[in-house]
Image (spheres, grey):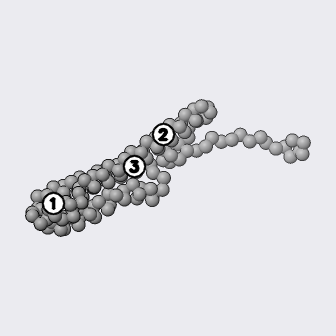
Amino acid sequence: MSSFKDLVEEQQDALDLLSRAFTNLRKKGPATLGAIEIRRKNLTTKWNDIVERHNEIVGLAKGADLKDPYFKENFFENAEEVFMDEEAKFVDEELAIKKADRETTSDHEQNGSERCVVGPTRNRKLPTLQLPTFSGKYAD
């Protein structure tokens, strides 16, 4: 069983990871829907760990521990705000990708061209252009 101080340190480390979740996604380059889904699940798992650890801390806290900055500065409430902010960023990014996909699809449908998907859904192959042939004469 961990001590109060050890649990508080683990909470701070977990919050640091939680607060960088979306930033770390952006470091990998263009986000895909699959990457967002996996990272959101990971974010939720980390949040659940923080909740469980918080319950342990509350159970262990006695007298002087209640004056610890963990309680005085409302660590758990602040962590909850960080979690919701990070979750919202993932949702916003997912909606932006879906909107871009819909716009790209409707543009192709309006132009009468076929939709060609290459790799992840955000990478599209542009329609081929039909260039006129040059006969070699200056008059052309």
Label 2 vs 1, first from the N-terminus: 1
Does the image show residue 121? yes
Q: Position of residue 123 (x, y in %)?
A: 53, 47
Q: Is residue 91 above or below residue 29?
A: above
Displayed quadrant of residue 58: bottom left
Left or right: where 80 falls relative to 38: left
Left or right: where 38 falls relative to 27: left
Q: Position of residue 134 (x, y in %)?
A: 82, 44
Measured in 3D between alpha carbons, the distance from the residue under mark 1 to the one under mark 3, in whole angstroms, is 29 Å
Which quadrant does the C terminus fall into? Answer: top right
* Helix, strand or loop for disc 1: helix
Q: Is residue 106 above or below residue 93?
A: above
Which residue in the structure is indicated by mark 1? 57
Check disc 1 and give the amino acid type: Ile
Which quadrant does the N terminus fall into? Answer: bottom left
Label 1 vs 3, first from the N-terminus: 1
Q: Nearer the viewer, residue 77 or 55?
A: 77
Which residue in the structure is indicated by mark 3? 89
Number of other residues with Cα within 10 Å of mark 3, as a class: few under 14, some 14 to 19, many 20 or more: some
